[in-house]
Amino acid sequence: MGSMAGIAGATVGSAVFPATVLAGKPVNSAPKPTANKLTLNGTTFSLTFFGPGVDPSSIADFNGFVGVADVQGTGTATNPDGSTETLLYDTDMRLMSGVYVGMDGAVHKGTFGFI
């Protein structure tokens, strides 16, 4: 009788938890890049320089918060021979958080940043 209960349990369990599961097509929730293109040193980026009246987001079909920081300054470089020199730097840092239409055409929520 105990072995019959074990067989019945295995049969019910296999019906509740099938051994194979069919998966759907993988979703590409990556954001669509903006149509604004900028080429620097032969590499093309999907972004624009920011300023008054310019959309600073690098994501198409985006609705949310965009934070921008343009940090400039100087730094000291140490060369292989031990000598030092002052160099200039200019960084463009952005943060985007909100909803967007992904490459799959669906609406997604996310937070992105780059330096």
Image (cartoon, grey):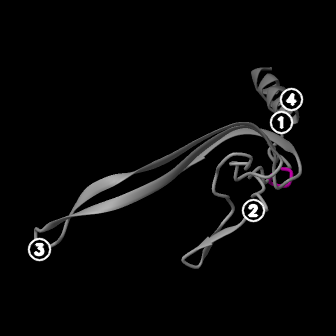
Residue 7 is situated, as x and y percent measured from the top left of the image, at: 81, 31
Q: Residue furthest left?
A: 82
Main SS category, magenta section: loop
Mark 1 vs mark 4, CA separation in Å: 5 Å
Residue with the mark numbered 3? 81
Of 88 and 28, the residue lying toward us: 88
Tell me the element at label 4.
helix
Instruction: Give yes or no for contact between labels 1 and 4 (Cβ–Cβ under 8 Å).
Output: yes
From the image, tell me which residue sits under label 4. Answer: 12
Give the extent of the magenta segment: 23-27
Q: Secondary structure at mark 2?
A: loop
Of badges 2 and 4, the one in the foreground is 2
Spot occupied by residue 92 in the image (x, y as percentages of width and height) = 52, 52
Magenta-drawn stretch contains 43: no
Q: Are marks 2 and 3 in contact (CB under 8 Å)?
A: no
Judging from the image, what secondary structure is the residue with disc 3 in? Answer: loop
- The residue to which callout 1 is attached is 14
Q: Residues within 10 Å of mark 3 (few under 14, many from 20)?
A: few
N-terminal-most mark, 2 or 4:
4
Name the residue at 76% across, 21% down. 2
Near-viewer residue (23 or 27) = 27
Which residue shows up at 74% across the image and 51% down it? 59
